[in-house]
Amino acid sequence: MKIEFRKVPQNQKDFILEVDSVKFLGTFCKISSKLVDIKSKFDGIVNVECCKCGTTFTIPFKEEINFLASDGVYSSDDERDLDKIIIEIDNNFIDFEEILQSELESLRSDYHVCDSCSKDETSIELEY
């Protein structure tokens, strides 16, 4: 789902997407001429790889994340925005699928250890 930045409404509007069994839902609204507030929830299961043995396993993904989408380069001295993830939009379109994919890739790129490796006391990683 894409929405042109200038067409984002002042009132909160709901959105929902689902990719790879992960739901991405929430609300968005324009808070200034160059800023959009996105309040979102992620709910689902994500396939990740063990950083030790390379086995693929699933983990739950339940998060509430607040984003601030900026039309262009973001600059503010407002400390209230520090608890939000800033997304700088450079093509005038907010792409909610791209936000979801980015969060999924960020989660997958983290270090995850499967149950069998977490019980293993050896400190070396296996080559796979």
Image (spheres, grey):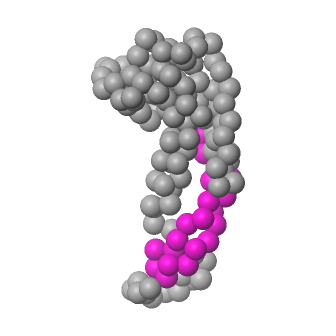
The residue nearer to you, when weighing 123 against 98, is 98
Which is the main secondary structure of the residues drawn in magenta? strand
Q: Position of residue 78 (x, y in %)?
A: 36, 19
Is-magenta flag for residue 65?
yes
Q: Is residue 97 left or right of residue 26?
A: left
Query: In which quadrant of the rendered view does residue 20 lie?
Result: bottom right
What residue span does the magenta drawing correspond to? 44-66
The residue nearer to you, when weighing 102 against 125, is: 102
| Residue plotted at (34% across, 24% down) | 72
**Residue 113 in sight:** no
Q: Nearer the viewer, residue 122 or 37?
A: 37
Q: From the image, which quarter does the N terminus lie in? A: top right
Name the residue: 53% across, 15% down: 7
- Residue at the (41%, 33%) spot, across then down: 87
Visible in this render: residue 23?
A: yes
Q: Position of residue 13 (x, y in %)?
A: 65, 21
Q: Position of residue 37 (x, y in %)?
A: 52, 23
Picture layout, residue 33 above or below residue 43: above
- Identify whether 6 is placed above or below 54: above
Across and down, in percent, residue 120 comes to: 53, 86
Q: Work out whether 19 lies above or below 65.
A: below
